Image: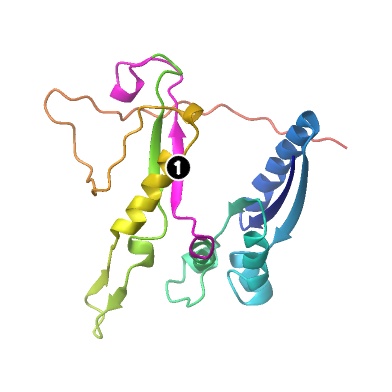
Amino acid sequence: MQKNIVVIEGDGIGPEVTRQAIKVLDAAAQQGGHEFTYKYCLMGADAIDKTGSPLPDDTIEAALNSDAILFGAIGHPKYDNDPTAKIRPEQGLLKLRKSLQLFANIRPYLPIRPSNTCPAEKQEPGERRLHHLRELTGGIYFGKKELDADGNRASDDCVYTAKKSRGSLTSLSNRPSNAGTNSHSSTKPMSSRPPASGEKSCRKSPPAIPTLRSTSSS
């Protein structure tokens, strides 16, 4: 298998994480007899500093002609602390989503062990998969933003369309059969609420984070 991969290291921890991910890809390629070709492109604060744009046209063109995108992270404190900045790193991410029509983010969830705490974990490991489907090109991110002249009233429109919802659901239904079953999706907005009487919450205490030792090699 031969694949062309656009690598967007981005900002902050992005380059560090991305370089480790490439080591994993190279190991998989070597073991499986694959060939991955990487093309490094700019996006985010790094792109603004070097080109003045959070997503240069060269990056869009490369992404459109690639088989996959390996994306790190974007953002920088100087933009986080300056809400008046007209050009921002996150604009590059939103533009990339729209340019490539990346309208659905599918996050699979597979319980490791059976549990009575959460209904999604009552099955034996491997028997049920839950898919969290997130629509990426609608909502507040792309909604109309208004601020009154006196600065006392602001609004962000949260807009979805039936077409976008159908596209997201289609992307989930077209997943391979071995990607899991018993998935449930809804096009209706759902608000969070505390568990009703007799219900159990899926909320758990976070697991303890192991201490990692750094190693160096010459």
Residue 217 screen position, x and y as percent: 84, 35
Side of 162 where 211 appears, left or right = right
Residue annotated with mark 1 = 106
Q: Quadrant of the C terminus?
A: top right
Residue that lies at the very extreme toward the right in this rendered image: 218
Q: Nearer the viewer, residue 76 or 38?
A: 38
At horizontal 28% and vertical 23% (from top left) the residue drawn is 119
Side of 154 where 182 appears, left or right = right
Can you see residue 118? no
At horizontal 33% and vertical 52% (from top left) the residue drawn is 165
Q: Nearer the viewer, residue 23 or 75?
A: 23
Residue 63 screen position, x and y as percent: 64, 60
Examine the rendered structure and indicate whether residue 2 appears above or below residue 27.
below
At horizontal 44% and vertical 55% (from top left) the residue drawn is 103
Q: Secondary structure at mark 1?
A: strand
Q: Amino acid at mark 1?
A: Ile
Query: Is residue 64 shown in magenta?
Result: no
Rate crowding at label 1 as few (under 14), some (14 to 19) or many (20 or more) other CA atoms within 10 Å.
some
Side of 92 where 172 appears, left or right = left
At horizontal 22% and vertical 24% (from top left) the residue drawn is 200
Query: Is residue 107 shown in magenta?
Result: yes
Residue that lies at the very extreme toward the bottom in this rendered image: 149
| Image label count | 1
Residue 132 screen position, x and y as percent: 39, 39
Q: Which residues are magenta?
A: 97-123
Can you see residue 2? yes
Q: Quadrant of the N terminus?
A: top right
Query: How was this image coloured?
Result: rainbow
Task: Tell me which corner region of the image, top left, top right, bottom left or bottom right, holds residue 137.
Answer: bottom left
Task: Tell me which corner region of the image, top left, top right, bottom left or bottom right, holds residue 116.
Answer: top left
Residue 162 screen position, x and y as percent: 29, 57
